[in-house]
Image (cartoon, grey):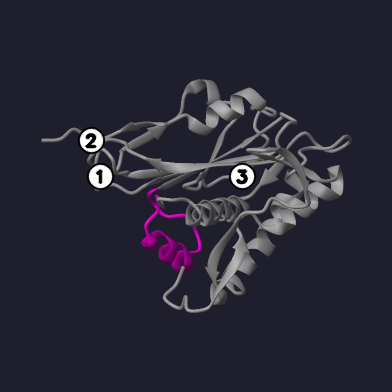
Amino acid sequence: FCEDCTDLNDEDALPLWISRVLVKRHGKLKQRTPHGTRDVMYAKFKVPIGEACNHGWLSVLENDTKKVMEPMIFGPQHGEPPCRTLTNAEQQLLSTWAMKTSLMFDLGTQPQAIPRRLYEQLRLYRCPLPNTVVLLGANRGDSRAVRIAHGGLNLGTVPTGTHDAFMTAITVFRVVFKVIGLLGPSFPQHMSYPSALLDGLHRIWPLPDRDISWPRDGMAFDDQSLIAFEGELPRLDFAAQH
């Protein structure tokens, strides 16, 4: 995230506080492996992070996000209002956390899909970048406590075999994020999602400049539709070439 990366720590790509919240409510997590499932106390995925950032602004971001996101992880509880209001400041915080988490998981992906300049820009601006969209939804399925899907995409602006975008879907029980970042030489004039999904999604970056209610129109995704959503591409409209 910065030039001072001489001292590296192995850090959890998905912060430990999320696993602790889940385990406290439901007991040990079951991790799927090539050899079957095993009980674990936290979702372990370590990546190397510079010590200065890790114990500085990244730590502040996690602590601030936890205050907003922790009450959302199990969704509305019995006796509570069916929705909670998220202010613009809270939407920016959640979208920044989702962007940071996408970058963290990219560090453990080979080949990496996200260039280093995006890490540096996130540190400088402390918010997702202008060429990034972050969507927020809600999950009613009960089979997955945590799930991450991440990879590079070719949207047709660069040669085959390379990528000009990345997409990350992050599920933390009831909370669903999708981050779409554009890396290519040309950017779309418009990005849209299939109408069947719109009722369940909020775009929280770029900011909508208004408060939103989450979950929007109930918990939109179940176990099956969530998996389909992870791989579903938005529609991108590029300007005509002259």
Callout 2 crowding tier (Cα within 10 Å): few <14, some 14–19, many ≥20: few
Q: Magenta region: which residues?
A: 113-131
| Circle 3: residue type | Asp
Marks 3 & 1, CB-CB < 8 Å contact = no
Marks 1 & 2, CB-CB < 8 Å contact = yes
Callout 1 crowding tier (Cα within 10 Å): few <14, some 14–19, many ≥20: few
Q: Disc 3 or disc 1, which is closer to the eye?
A: 1
Query: Which residue has dot 2 on it?
Result: 239
Give the x, y percent position of residue 239.
23, 35
Is residue 167 shown to the viewer in this render? no
- Against 145, is 217 above or below? above
Where residue 234 is drawn, which disc sits there? none
| Circle 1: residue type | Ser
Q: Was residue 130 drawn as part of the magenta stretch in this picture?
A: yes
Q: Is residue 221 left or right of residue 83?
A: left
Q: Between disc 2 and disc 3, whose residue precedes?
A: 3
Q: Between disc 1 and disc 2, whose residue precedes?
A: 1
Is residue 23 shown to the viewer in this render? yes
Q: What separation in Å lies between label 1 and label 2 (alpha carbons)?
A: 9 Å
Q: Is residue 81 left or right of residue 171?
A: right
- Against 75, is 40 above or below? below
> Which quadrant holds residue 13?
bottom right
Give the x, y percent position of residue 191.
39, 35
Give the x, y percent position of residue 67.
73, 57
Marks 2 & 3, CB-CB < 8 Å contact = no
Q: Secondary structure at mark 3?
A: loop
Residue lying at 38% horizontally and 49% vertically, measured from the top left: 131
Which residue occupies the foreground of this view, 53 or 49?
49
Q: Is residue 82 left or right of residue 159?
A: right
| Circle 2: residue type | Ala
Query: Which residue has dot 3 on it?
Result: 211
Residue lying at 71% horizontally and 58% vertically, measured from the top left: 16
